Image (cartoon, helix red, strand yellow):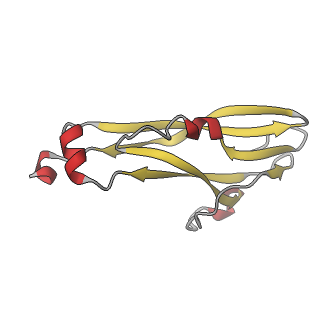
Amino acid sequence: MRNNGPLPVTLRGVSRDWLGQYEDFAPLAAPVAGLDGGDGFQSIGVDFSGTPIEPVVLDSGDERLVGVEFRTTDDRADACERWVDGSAVRWEAVTIAWHWLYFGHETELAFLVPIDFMAPTDRDCA
């Protein structure tokens, strides 16, 4: 996430409303948390620590990596029963929450590459 504006903004991370819509959803995979990836692109190539993101002020031109933790099913038999070979769950974007002055905002941010979680194949289920 990059602040391209002239004034500081507070990055709150992945929208709680966006995450909340998947709490009772039992798909092949679902987002469960926003993670703090550190300052800008200096952190690329470094493993995320899994630390939940806390609000952070981004001055004009500052960048912060934001990660998304997904949880997948660990029940192969259930996945084999419920999902068809070749099907998948795709996530193309995440909603990021931020505020400026006293106003909250949310921005949908597309992943550079969509994230796909593939169903087990017939071979996996045999």
Q: Is residue 8 left or right of residue 88?
A: right
- The one nearer the camera, 59 or 32, is 32
- The one nearer the camera, 14 or 19, is 19
Residue 54 seen from this side: yes
Rendered position, 82 above or below 64: above
**Residue 95 occupies which quadrant of the picture?**
top right
Residue 1 seen from this side: no
Residue in the image at 31% along x and 56% along y: 74
Residue furthest front as drawn:
24
Percent x, y of residue 109:
61, 36
Residue furthest left as drawn:
126
Percent x, y of residue 54:
74, 55
Residue in the image at 66% along x and 39% along y: 96
The number of callouts visible is: 0
Residue in the image at 81% along x and 38% along y: 99
Percent x, y of residue 83:
23, 38
Q: Is residue 55 left or right of residue 7?
A: left
Percent x, y of residue 20:
57, 38
Q: Is residue 83 left or right of residue 105?
A: left
Residue in the image at 52% along x and 42% along y: 112
